[in-house]
Amino acid sequence: MKKVLATILAVSTAALAITACNDGNTKKNPFDDDTETTTRETSEEVRPIFELSNLPRVDASEDFGEYYVDDIDEPWGVGKNLRMSDGSIRNFFCDYAFDMYDRQVNENLNYVATMSRPTVTCFDADKEGYVVYEVVYTQVFPICSKEPGNVYKSFFSYHGVGYIDFYTGTTFPLINLSTQIDSFSVTGTVIYNGKSYDVGYYEYRQDEFLDSSTSTTSDGYYIKRSTVQITSTSYFVVPEGYDGIMMYVYIADDTGRPIEEVLADDNPYYEAPGFFGDDENVNDYVFIGIQAPQ
């Protein structure tokens, strides 16, 4: 099962955006001491009834049918020394610029993005015995690229998040976001201890350029700085009383991947529910408990 979720967001060469970036080609530790901590917030007006019919249409959808979850002796997350977070998280991304012959022509001067602590709200579902978790978070990408003036196209690659059940280690199904889709839904029935539960997961992505600047270097290159913010909104329809959703975020440095692998990730593939196996290195991830404030 593929746990390292990677996707591509196209960047228009006509709309550049900015923030401060590293002066050198140095990769920061995602867990530097200056990692900003955010507090959990809730909306002032909580909707009393949640109706799925109010959600916008999705670009892709899948039905995973019936999925049987094995009974467990103890919760999957117990004793695994999971790296938990209650603040913002830094992880890696990579910017790419190409000339008209599809040759990469840029040098990244910053690789580190920041993901905010999710805001979690719980609503009553329109189906009796079920609730809806709304999870909202942002990812900010301070792109800083040294490149020539003949850039034909550009994009950046980053890691999306995944969700897992703390009790069983079952990963939530998903459809990988790509340049073709910005939203999806996956629905089906989970069977556990002989009981059936209808569940749903809906995901929406919005991107925004915040600001931009360009400067020139003494050797005739351009330093292009841009800040892109992605806002993600997730909805989970689950049985009332269920509190086992965890988000996982990939924080290992894989910015040196071959460009062929990066381009292969631009694919809206479907990932069925599965198990976060023992072959995964949990130290490559940070986990966040998804619980609404009491």
Image (cartoon, rainbow, N blue to C red):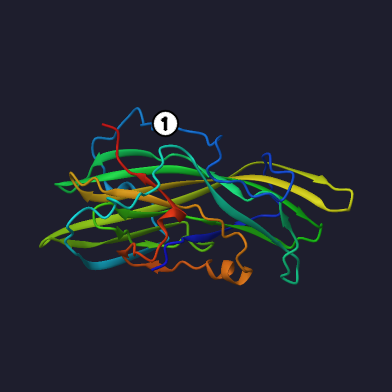
In percent of width and height, residue 230 lies at: 52, 47
In percent of width and height, residue 293 lies at: 29, 33
Question: Where the N terminus falls, by quadrant?
Answer: bottom left
Q: Residue at x 68, y 39 (%)?
A: 20
Q: Report helix, strand or loop for mark 1.
A: loop
Q: Residue furthest top?
A: 44
Up-down relation of residue 3 to residue 128 (above or below) = below
Q: On the rendered structure, is 28 left or right of 283? A: right
Within the image, what quadrant is residue 279 found in? bottom left
In percent of width and height, residue 115 lies at: 50, 44
Q: Badge 1: few (under 14), some or many (20 or more) residues near its Cα, within 10 Å?
A: few
Q: Residue at x 33, y 53 (%)?
A: 80
Which of 274 and 59 lies nearest the eye of the viewer?
274
Within the image, what quadrant is residue 106 found in? bottom right
Count of numbered badges drawn on the protein: 1
Which of 96 and 128 lies nearest the eye of the viewer?
96
Q: On the rendered structure, is 259 left or right of 55? A: right
Q: On the rendered structure, is 209 left or right of 165? A: right
Question: Where the C terminus falls, by quadrant?
Answer: top left
In percent of width and height, residue 225 lies at: 71, 45
Q: Residue at x 40, y 37 (%)?
A: 86
Up-down relation of residue 90 to residue 150 (above or below) = above
Would you name the residue on which mark 1 appears? 39
Up-down relation of residue 126 to residue 284 (above or below) = above
The three-letter amino acid code for the residue at tag 1 is Thr
